[in-house]
Amino acid sequence: MLEVSGIGGLIVLVLDLWAIVSIIGSRASTGAKVGWTLLVVLLPILGFIIWFFAGPRSSARHA
């Protein structure tokens, strides 16, 4: 099992929080939001990577 601590753990935490906020702000269905959030929470690194490439995006437009 991969254990992340120190600055690496902080980076993973920040990235996961960013992913969860983006998931909640997306236009995906409630079920999809729950599923993506569980994936990111239960598998922090792998879940983030999968979400980054395939997950729902925030509905807010970035200029």
Image: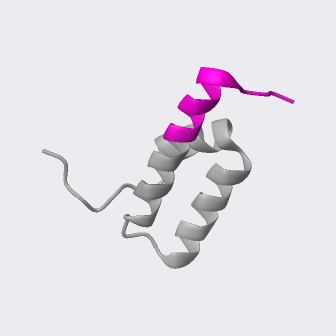
Residue at the far right: name it: 1
* Image x and y of residue 11, in percent: 54, 30
Residue at the far left: name it: 63
Residue 13 belongs to the span the image colors magenta: yes
Q: Is residue 56 visible?
A: no
Residue at the far top: name it: 7
Vertical arrangement, residue 16 with respect to residue 58, above or below = above
* Chosen colour scheme: one colour
Quick one: quadrant of the C terminus? top left
Quick one: quadrant of the N terminus? top right
Query: Between 50 and 19, which is closer to the camera in this rendering?
Result: 19
Total residue callouts: 0
Q: Quadrant of residue 9?
A: top right
Q: Main secondary structure of the magenta part?
A: helix
Vertical arrangement, residue 32 with respect to residue 3, above or below = below
In the picture provided, is 5 more to the left or to the right than 15?
right
Residue at the far bottom: name it: 30
Identify the residue shown where x is 59% and y is 22%.
Answer: 7
Q: Is residue 8 visible?
A: yes
In the picture provided, is 2 more to the left or to the right than 60?
right
Vertical arrangement, residue 2 with respect to residue 48, above or below = above
Identify the residue shown where x is 43% and y is 57%.
Answer: 21
* Image x and y of residue 43, in percent: 71, 45
Identify the residue shown where x is 24% and y is 59%.
Answer: 60
In the picture provided, is 59 more to the left or to the right than 14?
left
Query: Between 23 and 15, which is closer to the camera in this rendering?
Result: 15
* Image x and y of residue 6, in percent: 66, 23
Give the residues in magenta.
1-14
* Image x and y of residue 28, in percent: 43, 69
